[in-house]
Image (cartoon, rainbow, N blue to C red):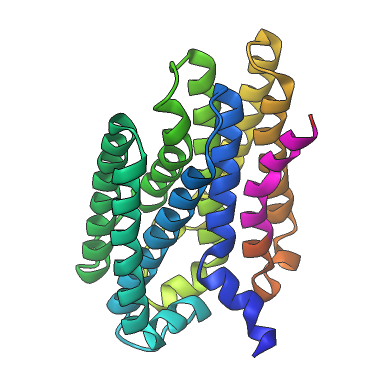
Amino acid sequence: MHKKLPEIYRVLSIDVCTGVCCMAFYFSQLSGHKLLSMDYLLIFIAVFCVYSADHIIDAWSIKKQASTFRHRFFQQNLFVMIVLTMILILADIIIAYCTLSNLIFKNGIFLSGIILIYYILNYFSFRLNLRNFFKEFLAAIIYTGGVMLPSFSRSLVTESLLVISFQIFLTAFLNLVIFSYFDHDSDKADKYNSIVILLGKGKALALIYILIILQIIIFIVTLIQNNIGVYFLVIPLLMTLILFNLFYFRKYFSINYRYRYAGDSIFFIPLLLLLK
């Protein structure tokens, strides 16, 4: 059982939830508005619920035994995960309503609406075998909105903050496209749409390199303008370079889901700000 613990840790997206909290810390440092412990708890629970609900929909949609361990886990524990997720959603809403400002709570409700649209598109694209080009793109938007929402709701949105937000969006999108590239065969076996299946590996490969080059260009331009502290600029660049190496050495990282561990770990990089 102990050998499966790291895999269950990943399957339940605990690493992703922690990474989102690290990214929220990054934006709090960037905006100059410190987040409270309760803010991080709410973020962690919310992300856990979002990812669990997404995996529940996937497990529900796949009518045979799933090809991936994550989907099989949710298939086998579907009722427990549904009940747990519903309880946590209710608890998160009540705590948020009681502790957060009216503006942040309203912004959270707005983001929840976008998440609901994502669920609907994802579910019906699978059920009706539709071409869903928006899955990874919309997921990256939701991710970026989630990590920046607590800080941006408390501060003036400047051009510099928007540029950094765009970089984080590109990083999240690149991360998801690379994951889809690695998951191509299992997604195809489960008849599960992804951007790589829809575009084909050739075009997806081109998209990955375009995103990496775009990130480097933005870093250079922003560094020349010098409107943002160098610490904040280097972090998205480091994240992108790690993803590039992960993809470049994809034969190595394709073994035992190494790409997932490495890819999700990039969102811990903002903890470097604790050293400045």
Is residue 104 visible in this depiction of the protein?
A: yes
In the image, is residue 14 above or below residue 63? above
Q: Residue 175 in the image: x percent, y percent? A: 56, 50
Closer-to-camera residue (249/27): 27
The residue at the point 54 percent across, 16 percent down is 160
The residue at the point 63 percent across, 80 percent down is 5
The residue at the point 50 percent across, 29 percent down is 165
State which quarter of the image contains the N terminus: bottom right
Closer-to-camera residue (249/259): 259
In the image, is residue 49 above or below residue 26? below
Q: How many marks?
A: 0
The residue at the point 48 percent across, 22 percent down is 162
Is 271 one of the magenta-colored residues?
yes
Examine the image and state in which quarter residue 197 appears.
bottom left
Q: Residue 259 in the image: x percent, y percent? A: 66, 63
Examine the image and state in which quarter residue 128 appears.
bottom left
Q: Residue 132 in the image: x percent, y percent? A: 30, 55
Q: Residue 12 in the image: x percent, y percent? A: 50, 70
Task: Tell me if 59 is positioned left or right of 9 in this view.
Answer: left
Q: Residue furthest front?
A: 98
Task: Tell me if 1 is positioned left or right of 204 in this view.
Answer: right
Q: Residue furthest right?
A: 275
Is 268 one of the magenta-colored residues?
yes
- Label the magenta part by its dominant secondary structure: helix
What segment is highlighted magenta in the picture?
262-275
State which quarter of the image contains the C terminus: top right
